[in-house]
Amino acid sequence: MLSACLLAELCVFNHFKCLSYYICHVILMFCSAACHFVYLPNPCDFLLLFQRSEGVWDDEALQLTQQLLSSNPDFATLWNYRREILMHLETVKDEDEVQKIYEAELLFLESCLKVNPKSYGSWHHRGWVSARLPRPDWARELSLCDRCLSLDDRNFHCWDYRRMVVKISGVPVDQELAFTDRLIGSNFSNYSSWHYRSTLLPLLHPESPEPPSPCHEPPQTSPPPSPQTHSHRVCEEQLLKEYELVQNAFFTDPNDQSAWFYYRWLLGRAEREEMISCVYVSRDEERVAVAFSRPVNAQSVGLLLVLDGQPQRVEWRSVHPRFKHSPVWICDLPPGTINDISNEHNLTVHWTEKHTHRDCALYTGRTESWCRDSATDQELFRSELSVEKTSVLQSELQSVNQLQELEPLNKWCLLTIILLMRALDPLGYEKETLAHFQTLKEVDSMRSAYYSDLCSKFMIENTILKMEYAEVRVFSISDKNLTTLCHLDQLLLVTHINLSSNQLQQLPPQFAMLQCLEVLEADNNSIENLEGVYHLPKLEEVLLKNNKISTLADLQPLASCPKLKRLDLRGNPVAQTPNVESELVELLPSVTDLLL
C-alpha cells in the first residue's frame, strides 16, 4: 500500500513529470484502489503539481491554488506551493503591491476558516502571512480571534494563533488577562481560558524575588522574563483573589473539570530552583555523589570538581546505565586522594551552566561527609504559609468540605480536599487524607491505581519529613499499601530502608540513587525484579522474604553490590529452583548468610 502511494508521488513530482495528465490520472486511480481511499480526479490537481515541479510561480498558479483550497483548505501540498509563489512575488513586486497581495491573502484565509474553523493548514498559513506582511494590522487579527473564539472557545488552533499575535504585537499582559476574565465569565467550562490565565498571572503578578543564597553566584546577564522561562510563581495577594474566582466556578457546576484543574494549579508548589541540593563524599570508596534539584546530564552541563583548591579530572556517571539524565551523579576520585583519615579535605562542586556551587568539608577522623539542603529547607513538599494565606486556605477547606457534604460522590471535590490538607499541614491531616483516598477509590474505581500511586507519593513525602525532623538516616514506611516509589533522590544519605508489607512490584532503576544504603528490608511485597539494586557500594543486607522473585536472572543486579553479606529469599519461587543454593553461591560469592 505504501509503495503504491510512493509510486504515485514519484510519478507526479519527479521521474514521470513529462507524462500526459491522462497517465498521471490512471496511476492515481490505481493507487486509490490499493490504498483504500476515494480519489475524485480534478484536472487542476495534475496541472498544479506539474507546474510546481517545473518551477512555475505566477498569478495563474496562485489563482488555481485558491480555487482548490477554497473547497478543501486541508491540502498541505497546495499551501506549500502557494507560499513558494508568494515568496517569489515578493522578489518582483514593490512593498505596496506585496502589502495588497498579502491583505488579499488574509481575506482568502477567512473564507477558508469558514469552511473549516479548525484547519491546521489555514491557521498555519495565516501565521506565516501575518509574519511577512509589511504593515500588519494586529488589531484586526485579534478581532478575528475574538470572533472565532466566541463561536468555539476551545479552538486550540485559534488560541495558538492568538498567542503568536500577542507576542509579536506586544499586547499588554493585563489586557490579555482581562480577555480571559470575559471568556471565563461567559463560560466557566473553558479549559483554554483557565490555562491561558495560568501563563499570564506569573507575568503580571510575580512573586517577590528572594535574596540570593550564599552558595549561588549571580548570573552574568538577567534576560527578561517570558512565559517559557518564568518561574510560574504568583504573588500571594493575587493568589488569594484567584481562590475566590475559581470557587465561584466549581460551586456553580461541581462536576465541571476545568475549574478544578485550575484550582489544583493554584495549590501546586512553585517550580524548584535549579541548584545542587547535596554533595556527599566517602573516604572508603573515594567517591563523590552529587544530587541536583532536577534531572540533568552531568556530562554536558559543565560540572567541575575542585579538591583542596585543585581542579580534578574525573568521569561523572549516572547511578544507573538507563539514565542519561538523572538527579544524582557520582564520580570516583584518583586512588589515594582522600583515603588518609588523618587528613582534612575541602571539596567544591561547581555547576558552571547555572553559576552555582556547593562546598563540602571532610574533617579529620571522619569517613564521610555531606552538605545538603533538606526537603524542609527547600520547601519541597510543603511551603511556609503566611498567616493570611493559612487563614484563606482554612476557609477554602471549610467551603469545599461543605460542597462535599452536598456532593458526597464528587471525585474532584474529594481530591481538592486532599490537596488543601496537604497545603495546610500534610502531617497533621495524614489520617484524614488516607480516609479520603479510600473513598476516592470507591467513587472512581476506574482510576483506583492512579489514586493508589498518588497516595503512595504523599505517604513517602510525609515519611521524608518525619525522618528529617528526627534527624536520622533511617527511612521506615512499612505497611502503608505503597504501590510505587518516588522522591528517591531525597534518600541519597539513607543507610537503612524498610519497605516491608506493601504492594510494591519492583525496585525501579531510581533506587540506585540510595548510594549510602546498608540495609534493605522489603519483605511481604510482590517484588518481581531488583533492577534498581545496582552498584550500591555500602549495601550489606537484603531481606526479601515472601516476594515473587522467580529466576536467578532477577537477582543478577545484586552481583554489582560488593559488600553484600546477608540475603533472605524465603517464600520466593526462586527458592524452589533446583540447585539454587550452589548457583547463588557462584553468582554472589560475597554472601555468607543465605536464607532460602
Image (tube, grey):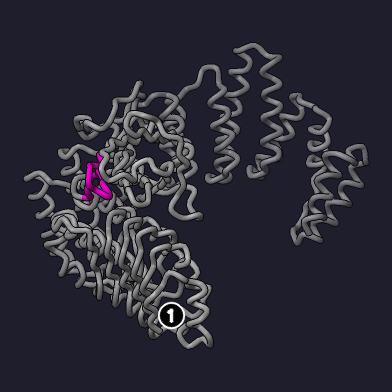
Amino acid type indicated by mark 1: Lys
The spot of residue 233 in percent (x, y) is 26, 39
Magenta range is 360-375
- Of 156 and 585, which appears nearest the observer? 585
Figure quadrant of residue 310: top left
Q: Is residue 419 visible?
A: no
Residue at image mark 1: 548
Would you say residue 368 sits in the magenta stretch?
A: yes
> Residue 196 in magenta?
no
In which quadrant of the rendered view does residue 352 lie? Answer: top left
As helix, strand or loop, the secondary structure at mark 1 comes to loop
- Is residue 241 visible in this depiction of the protein? yes
Percent across and percent down for residue 174 are: 28, 30
| Vertical comparison of 572 with 36: above or below | below
Q: In the figure, is residue 218 to the left or right of 66?
A: left
Residue 277, position as x, y percentages in the image: 29, 43
Left or right: residue 237 compared with residue 341: left
